Image (cartoon, rainbow, N blue to C red):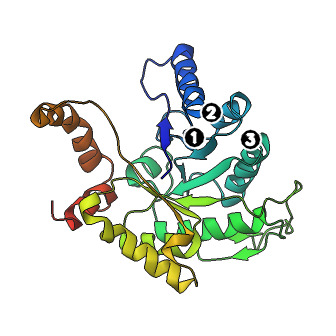
Amino acid sequence: MKLAIHFGVTTYTSSNEDWQSAIAYVVEAERLGVDSAWSVETWGYDGATPLAYLAAKTTSIRLGTGILQVGTRTPALTAMTAMTLASLSGDRFILGLGVSGPQVIEGWHGVRFARPLQRLRETVEIVRKVTRGERLVYHGEMYNVPLPEGEGKALTSSVPPRPDLPVYLATLGPKSLELTGELADGWLGTSFIPEHASMFFDPIATGAAQAGRSLADLELQVAAGVVAFSDDVERLIAPRKPGLAFTLGAMGSRQHNFYNDVFQRAGY
């Protein structure tokens, strides 16, 4: 088993001191043998820039985006960012991707939250072409590169390829979990429910089998937030309620709330 941490500065009153504390937290985690550190991206700070700084402050801990939101960047820009961070970190970077939800994608970025699963698939496929050093020609349902009616011609990345750059997906629904098994190097398991592990792992295994792989070929990361310690369980529940209520109620819309959906599928 490997240990990973999430880090970030998300408060509305954040300062340089907050960032220095977050960086010191990751540096100390590396000293203690933690395997990876994952940045956060919602509607505050971006998830890529802090990792560039951390690449210069650390030497061994893996650095991942947890997550970059597809649809807010072009797939080519996502690949460029990933290859830059891989280069800066000595190939310690992991590209974590996810679809986010309509509240962030439409409410913050002003981009239509349309066909997120297809967008995720095409983003991964385009990123792979770029990191392998292939000439970028891609005609999908969401992306066309180069534009058929445009004046630009297909290009190949001007920097050395990184064909082994790992791509992890943060997914929750059955179809998106299958996609993870089919395309990804790893899974970022937010809202993981240990008592219902098969609800997550079985679709990943199905997708992996369709690609001629097995569940063992993917690195599986499950989130386990530690907020307090006590023998009084009821006392521990109360402080957690507001955050959980926000996730299940506000991190989506009436039509799309993946966090709420996964807890309903588990019978809650």
In the foreground, 247 or 31: 31
- Residue 29 visible (yes or no): yes
The reply to whether residue 115 is in sight is no
Q: Quadrant of residue 237?
A: top left
Instruction: Using a 10 Å C-alpha cutoff, classify the residue at mark 1 as few (fewer than 14 neighbours), some (14 to 19) or many (20 or more).
Output: many
Which residue is more in the foreground, 4 or 192?
4
x and y, in percent, of residue 74 in the image = 66, 57
Q: How many marks?
A: 3
Q: Where is residue 45 in the image (x, y as percent from the top left)?
A: 54, 33
Residue drawn at the location 64% of the way across and 77% of the way down: 140
Numbered badge on residue 260: none
| Residue position for label 3 | 89
Say if 26 sits above or below 78 in the image.
above
Q: How crowded is mark 3: few (under 14 residues within 10 Å), some or many (20 or more)?
A: many
Give the residue type that dot 1 points to: Gly
Cα–Cα gap, marks 3 and 1: 15 Å
- Pick the residue in front: 171 or 250: 171
Label 3 is placed on what type of residue? Ser
Callout 2 secondary element: helix
Image height check: is 217 above or below 225?
A: below
Q: Where is residue 267 in the image (x, y as percent from the top left)?
A: 16, 65
- Residue 253 versus residue 88: which sits nearer the camera? 88
Above or below, comparing residue 121 to residue 68 in the picture: below
Left or right of residue 109: residue 233? left
- Nearest-to-viewer mark from 3 and 1: 3
> Which residue in the structure is indicated by mark 1?
47
Three-letter amino acid code of the residue under disc 2: Pro
- Residue at image x 86%, y 65%? 155
